[in-house]
Image (spheres, grey):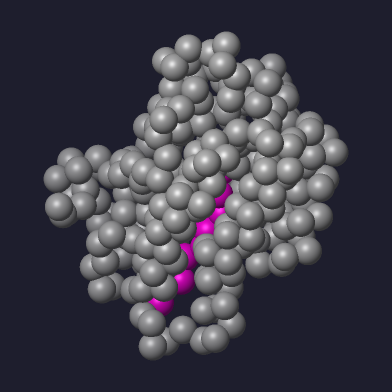
Amino acid sequence: MSDSHPNISQDLAGEVALVTGATSGLGARFAQVLAGAGAKVICTGRRLERLDKLVATIRSAGGSAVGVEMDMTDTDSITNGFVEAESAFGTVTILVNNAGVPDAQRAHKMDVELIDRVFDTNLRGPFVLSVEHAKRLLAEQRPGRQINISSMSGFHYDGHGAALYSVTKAAIARMTETLAVEWSRNHINVNGIAPGAFESEMMDGMIERVGEFWQHMPRKRLGRTRQLDSTLLYLCSPASDAVTGTIIKVDDGQSPR
């Protein structure tokens, strides 16, 4: 990050950000927020028509964005997508590992194919992508930021299904901590956000299964995606220059302490 920015700045002009899982929910919001702060944004995901729509929305608001197909279960797709991203805007300086899928089943009812897909999408893919990103920054001796989206379910599990999702999100938090140590000397800051229950396409599926569960939470509401804007910008910008290896929990007081 440029030394010309004060440490209260959330100005991302000159930065290139890659956001995974940008076809819906939090990822789509993150891409728009980063573009609004001045970053050139690579929106990635598997559903090209949704990427095209998101890119058009960002450009119509005056931002810079491109869409790149990327499947987090496919190593070649990750590496090829990274090459395509850099051919569009140059070196990626900010990586937001947001892609994820739920399992929505009790552990003993999951077939191996689903187990593999959840592990690959939620953990293996983000790890591979983080390494690809870091390799490029190290080769160019450039600082950078990685923000990994964990979940409060990685810290608390209610036993009603999605055990593997909880395991992978706990692992994402630990990945954040370990890679922060690994690359600290290279000025690559690695941090995480652990949202609670926020409005998203994934949350819609949960509501279909269990109903309006938020009525049992202290504030009786789901989080709004915009409530994560300031946390994302803080971790991506010069304002958090000395922060690395931290997971910020944003759950609206939903979870037991």
Q: Residue at x 41, y 30 (%)?
A: 242
- Is 217 on the left-hand or right-hand side of 9? left
- Is 61 on the left-hand or right-hand side of 127? right
Q: Residue at x 54, y 13 (%)?
A: 5
x then y, percent, for residue 34: 57, 28
Q: Is residue 254 one of those drawn in magenta?
A: no
Q: Residue at x 36, y 73 (%)?
A: 163
Outermost residue, front direction? 185
Instruction: Out of 81 and 162, give the one closest to the viewer.
Output: 81
Instruction: Out of 248 and 31, give the one closest to the viewer.
Output: 248
Q: Residue at x 28, y 59 (%)?
A: 155
- Residue 92 in sight in this render: no
- Is 19 on the left-hand or right-hand side of 204? right
Q: Main secondary structure of the magenta part?
A: loop
Place residue 13 in its image quadrant. Answer: top right
x then y, percent, for residue 15: 65, 26
For the N terminus, the image quarter is top right
- Is 200 on the left-hand or right-hand side of 198? right
Place residue 156 in its image quadrant. Answer: bottom left
- Residue 87 in sight in this render: yes
Report the span colored magenta. 96-105
Place residue 14 in its image quadrant. Answer: top right
